[in-house]
């Protein structure tokens, strides 16, 4: 193993990336994570902000202007929090979680920067009160960066860049501005590191769960959907058929005389035939259709939004794709054929009855000489 490949493997472990095939699921994962964080943060904000407003009255006695300024800085954050809770109630599965979470984090950061700058004008409370609040806020809002460093400019950029100008505007000497920014800047660096580590930890967690899910839903030999996964697809397709008044077809396929392949060449070669068959079935179907290993050498395919003529064409295309070219194996090229039974659903059907009719049609194809397609009655 070369140094370059070792370095790439190390970088992949530290900074994993989500495969393209899982991007849609990862987006869903990110949205769910953002929704949980947003709701919890909104509840915390609606409890804590009034409490801090009260603390202001206790610490900064008889400074009504400060109280008003701080209340105005806190108002946008409160409104964002209320908006999150409202959308969680009305549209729990909407696309709002991440945008509103970032907006609330930005408003919270802007609020604390404004209050921190105000404190340099309205003196009278503890000298480190708002400084500590700013540092805590920098750490707290980092939880909103569900996509790591790419969210940092959105949350911290404008508030942090405007802070020195606000301090100077409020009368802080230029020589003192750096002193006021040292600890917040240090906290920002720490927050960036933690945010990126958490983001990649979330990716690793997602990928581990995804791999477990796929291993539970796929056939380990062919990589196709297993019976359990296909059953779920069929249930969804049947519900969609009833809702939108469209039809689907089930194709049952079985290798012809597959036992002879195993007896003559061994099960390893038989497995190679099954893998190649899975590849040919997959390439013969549309993206929206599904193929599964139903059991042994039997495969089940779901053809969606179809009719009798179109589904027969699909079944015949599959049959030809298997027959026309020998299967490459370690025992040499082997001629393989496939028998298929086809059934379309009707209003009175369940998924089970469609499968039974397709299976009977497959049996008829075997009886009628194999290497053919039979349409169920």
Image: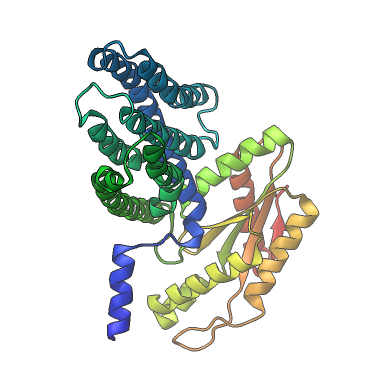
Give the image quarter of residue 321. Answer: bottom right
The residue shown at (55%, 81%) is 327
Left or right placement of residue 158 versus residue 289 in this view = left
Q: How far across and down, in percent of the image, does residue 252 sit?
A: 60, 56
Q: How is the image coloured?
A: rainbow
- Residue placed furthest toward the top: 62
Residue 362 visible somewhere in the drawing: yes
In this view, the residue in front, 305 or 374, is: 305
Left or right placement of residue 151 versus residue 57 in this view = right
The residue shown at (68%, 38%) is 241
Seen in the picture, residue 191 relative to 4 is either above or below; the reply is above
Quadrant in the picture for the N terminus: bottom left
- Residue placed furthest toward the right: 309
Residue 347 visible somewhere in the drawing: no
Q: How many marks?
A: 0
Left or right placement of residue 27 versus residue 47 in this view = right
Q: How far across and down, in percent of the image, does residue 251 sit?
A: 63, 55
The residue shown at (36%, 24%) is 45
Seen in the picture, residue 10 relative to 244 is either above or below; the reply is below
Q: How far across and down, in percent of the image, does residue 350 sit?
A: 61, 36
The residue shown at (37%, 44%) is 164
Give the image quarter of residue 221. Answer: bottom left
Seen in the picture, residue 153 relative to 127 is either above or below; the reply is below
Q: How far across and down, in percent of the image, does residue 357 sit?
A: 64, 47
- Residue placed furthest toward the bottom: 332
Left or right placement of residue 358 versus residue 115 in this view = right
């Amino acid at each position: 193993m070369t140094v370059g490949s070792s370095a790439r493997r190390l970088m992949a472990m530290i900074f994993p990336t989500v495969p393209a095939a899982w991007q849609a699921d990862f987006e869903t994962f990110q949205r769910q994570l953002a929704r949980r964080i947003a709701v919890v943060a909104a509840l915390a904000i609606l409890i804590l902000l009034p409490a801090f407003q009260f603390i202001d009255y206790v610490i900064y006695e008889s400074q009504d202007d400060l109280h008003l300024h701080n209340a105005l800085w806190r108002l946008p954050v409160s409104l964002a929090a209320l908006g999150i809770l409202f959308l969680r109630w009305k549209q729990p599965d909407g696309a709002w979680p991440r945008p509103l979470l970032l907006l609330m984090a930005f408003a919270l950061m802007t609020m604390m920067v404004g209050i921190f700058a105000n404190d340099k004008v309205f003196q009278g409370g503890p000298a480190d009160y708002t400084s500590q609040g700013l540092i805590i806020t920098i750490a707290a809002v980092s939880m909103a960066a569900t996509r790591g460093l790419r969210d940092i400019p959105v949350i911290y950029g404008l508030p942090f860049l405007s802070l020195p100008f606000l301090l100077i505007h409020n009368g802080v000497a230029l020589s003192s501005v750096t002193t006021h920014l040292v600890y917040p800047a240090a906290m920002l660096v720490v927050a960036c590191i933690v945010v990126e580590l958490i983001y990649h930890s979330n990716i690793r967690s997602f990928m581990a769960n995804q791999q477990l899910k796929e291993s539970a839903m796929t056939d380990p030999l062919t990589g196709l959907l297993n019976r359990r996964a296909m059953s779920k697809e069929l249930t969804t397709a049947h519900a969609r058929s009833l809702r939108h008044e469209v039809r689907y077809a089930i194709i049952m396929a079985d290798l012809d005389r597959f036992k002879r392949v195993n007896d003559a060449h061994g099960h390893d070669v038989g497995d190679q035939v099954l893998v190649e068959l899975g590849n040919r079935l997959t390439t013969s179907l549309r993206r929206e259709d599904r193929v599964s290993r139903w059991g042994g050498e039997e495969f089940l395919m779901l053809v969606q939004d179809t009719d009798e003529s179109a589904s027969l064409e699909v079944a015949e295309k599959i049959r030809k794709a298997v027959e026309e070219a020998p299967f490459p194996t370690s025992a040499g090229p082997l001629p393989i054929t496939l028998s298929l039974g086809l059934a379309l659903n009707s209003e009175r059907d369940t998924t089970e009855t469609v499968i039974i009719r397709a299976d009977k049609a497959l049996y008829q194809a075997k009886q009628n000489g194999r290497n053919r397609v039979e349409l169920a009655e």
